[in-house]
Image (cartoon, rainbow, N blue to C red):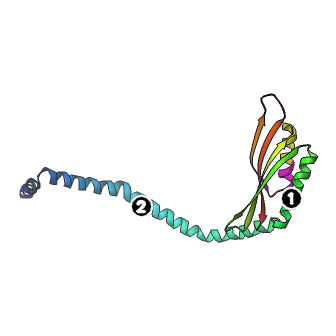
C-alpha cells in the first residue's frame, strides 16, 4: 500500500500542478454528470416513453375534430350568421358603424375562422346585452376582444369588438 502511494505521488509530481488540476477537474465533471445530468437523462427518457404510449390517443382527437367539424355550419352559412349579428344589434339598439372581415384558414383542422371587427355605438348596458345575445344565439362565435372608450367631453361610448366566427372549411 505504501508503495502504491509513493508511485501515485511520483506520477503526480511528473504531471505538475496543471496536470493535477486537470485530473481534479475531470473527477469533478464525472461526479457532476452522475449526480446531476444522468438522473435528468433518465427522467427525460421516461417522459418520452410516456408520450409514445399516449400517441394512439391522438388518433381519437382526430375523431373529435371530425365531430366538431360536423357541428359547424358551412362557409355559405357564415353570411347568414353575420346577418344575424346585424339583426341582434338592431334589436339591442346598438349601431354597428364600421366592420372589417377577414377569413383565416386553420390548416390541419379544415376550419375557417372569419375574424370580425366592429365599431359599436351604444351605452354600456346595451352593448353588454348585445354581446351576451350574440354569444348565446351563435354558438360558433367567440369574443376575442372588447375595448370601451368614452370621449373626454362625456359623449357617447365608443366600443370596438373583435369576434371570430368558426365555420367548416
Q: List the residue tagged with mark 2.
A: 41
Please report the residue visible at 74 percent of the width from the left and 64 percent of the height from the top: 112
Residue 18, position as x, y percentages in the image: 16, 52
Magenta part of the protein: which range? 133-143
The percent position of residue 46, horizontal first and vertical second, equals: 48, 63
Query: Is residue 83 left or right of 149 when viewed as pictured?
Result: right
Question: Mark 1 = which residue?
Answer: 81
- Tell whether 18 sits left or right of 88: left
Quarter of the view holding residue 43: bottom left
Name the secondary structure under disc 2: helix
Quarter of the C terminus within the rendering: bottom right
Q: Residue furthest right?
A: 91
* Residue 129 at x, y percent in the picture: 87, 43
- Badge 1 crowding class, 10 Å Cα cut-off, few under 14, some 14 to 19, many 20 or more, is some
- Residue at figure coordinates x 84%, y 67% from the top left: 76
Q: CA distance from mark 1 to mark 2?
A: 53 Å
Of tags 1 and 2, which is closer to the observer? 1
Give the farthest residue toward the top. Answer: 153
Quarter the N terminus occupies: bottom left
Amino acid at each position: 500500500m505504501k508503495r502504491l502511494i509513493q508511485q501515485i505521488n511520483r506520477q503526480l509530481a511528473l504531471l505538475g500542478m496543471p496536470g493535477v488540476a486537470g485530473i481534479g477537474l475531470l473527477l469533478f465533471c464525472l461526479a457532476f454528470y452522475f449526480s446531476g445530468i444522468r438522473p435528468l437523462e433518465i427522467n427525460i427518457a421516461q417522459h418520452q416513453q410516456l408520450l409514445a404510449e399516449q400517441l394512439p390517443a391522438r388518433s381519437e382527437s382526430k375523431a373529435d375534430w371530425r365531430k366538431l367539424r360536423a357541428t359547424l355550419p358551412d362557409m355559405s352559412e357564415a353570411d347568414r350568421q353575420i346577418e344575424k349579428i346585424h339583426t341582434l344589434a338592431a334589436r339591442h339598439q346598438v349601431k354597428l358603424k364600421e366592420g372589417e372581415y377577414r377569413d383565416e384558414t386553420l390548416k390541419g383542422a379544415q376550419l375557417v375562422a372569419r375574424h370580425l371587427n366592429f365599431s359599436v355605438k351604444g351605452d354600456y348596458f346595451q352593448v353588454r346585452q348585445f354581446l351576451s345575445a350574440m354569444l348565446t344565439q351563435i354558438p360558433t362565435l367567440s369574443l376575442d376582444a372588447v375595448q370601451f372608450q368614452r370621449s373626454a367631453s362625456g359623449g357617447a361610448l365608443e366600443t370596438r369588438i373583435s369576434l371570430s366566427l368558426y365555420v367548416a372549411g
